[in-house]
Image (cartoon, coloured by chain):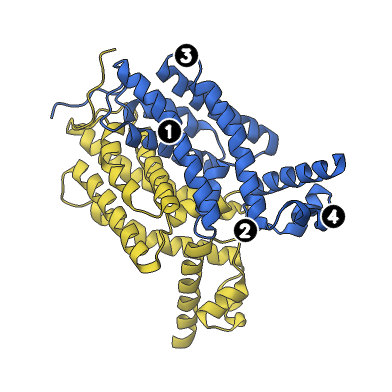
Chain colours: A yellow, B blue
Amino acid sequence: MGRTSDARKKILEAAQSLIELRGYSALGVAEICKAAEVPKGSFYYFFESKEALALTVIDEHWAAERGEWNRILKGDAEPLQRLRQLFEATEAQHRAGREHRGSIAGCMLGNLSLEMCNQSEAVRDRLQEIFEAQVDMIEAVIVEALSRGEVTVDDTRESARAVVAQLEGQVLFAKLYNTTSPLGTLWANCLALLGGPTASVPAAN
Amino acid sequence: MGRTSDARKKILEAAQSLIELRGYSALGVAEICKAAEVPKGSFYYFFESKEALALTVIDEHWAAERGEWNRILKGDAEPLQRLRQLFEATEAQHRAGREHRGSIAGCMLGNLSLEMCNQSEAVRDRLQEIFEAQVDMIEAVIVEALSRGEVTVDDTRESARAVVAQLEGQVLFAKLYNTTSPLGTLWANCLALLGGPTASVPAAN
């Protein structure tokens, strides 16, 4: 029992780091098992297919990330400050990843969305659910900030989606340029998207 | 001569559509040649490697896209209207792609950034140059709009990058949800990012 749980954990850890490094398509089950130092039979004992493994990797990744998002976005700080903390935590996480690996792996959910959604309907569905959950969490903070008169948005849902889109876009740049500096703009851009207090004053129409 | 040029064109067309469909890593040279209906020897006559092919596919894709961006962004309309036209053209292009293929392929440059930049320094460099060129083109329009008092931005470069990041993020959602509707928000979000005339009025600080 101890051993088999250990094998599953090893497979998941190896898969997560290989997927972060090289994506999903380029990986084979044999390579994952070799990196995990488990026999290939173990793989099919725990996972029906490579797609089933990908779904589990996605779920575990999001469970950890959701925990972090909840900790920050449901924290005690004022609503907009919580968004700021989320961006700072995202930047710190990518900075640590870069120090550890030498390169920025990007957002695993964004990476797999672009790589896999047209290959696997199960992965597409799961990633849609996760991004909806992210938009839910951001929207809840925007609704709170709106009720305090701190932002001026017409559609809290679309504004939340724009904030997540900006995050994914800047993480793409962070990965491509292998620097966290694009992430330093997230807070100012978020305020602009939400018509927040320090956003630029619009010109007279 | 006629035949060889034809073979190169066939390989590029097959590669472009296979990369749009399934990404780069999952493809083999044999599969590309089969789809192109050319012998494998032809491939290595024209391309040194699969990476060299990817660079050519990227260059040809960007040459076409840059032509479209130039046509719109250097056109006669007022500066902000040119940005609006760019977003509308992007939406129309993805809608046409969806009708043709049944799924949204997303932005090839964004797809390959996330998939390949940590695999190939040559691809990373090329994609960085292309995104810098995109940011240049958007920035030129923002500078023009700023000189007319139509936007209020502190840093035209970072604002242009935020616009491109928002575009990449919303195209990611369009691909993931297989609908062009996220692209319908680009214009409003761009105005908000630039503090443009119809952006929400910020709350008093």
Upstream in sequence: badge 2 or badge 3: 2
B30 displayed left or right of A13: right
Q: Chain of mark 2?
A: B
Camera sees residue A195 = yes
Amino acid at pointer 3? Ala
The answer to whether the residue labelled 1 contacts the one labelled 4, judged by CB atoms less than 8 Å apart, is no
Q: Secondary structure at mark 3?
A: loop
Amino acid at pointer 1? Asp
Give the x, y percent position of residue B11.
Answer: 76, 47
Upstream in sequence: badge 4 or badge 3: 4
- B184 lies above or below A132: above
Location of mark 1 (residue)? B136
Residue drawn at x 57%, y 50% as measured from the top left: A117
Amino acid at pointer 2? Ser
Location of mark 2 (residue)? B25
Upstream in sequence: badge 2 or badge 4: 2
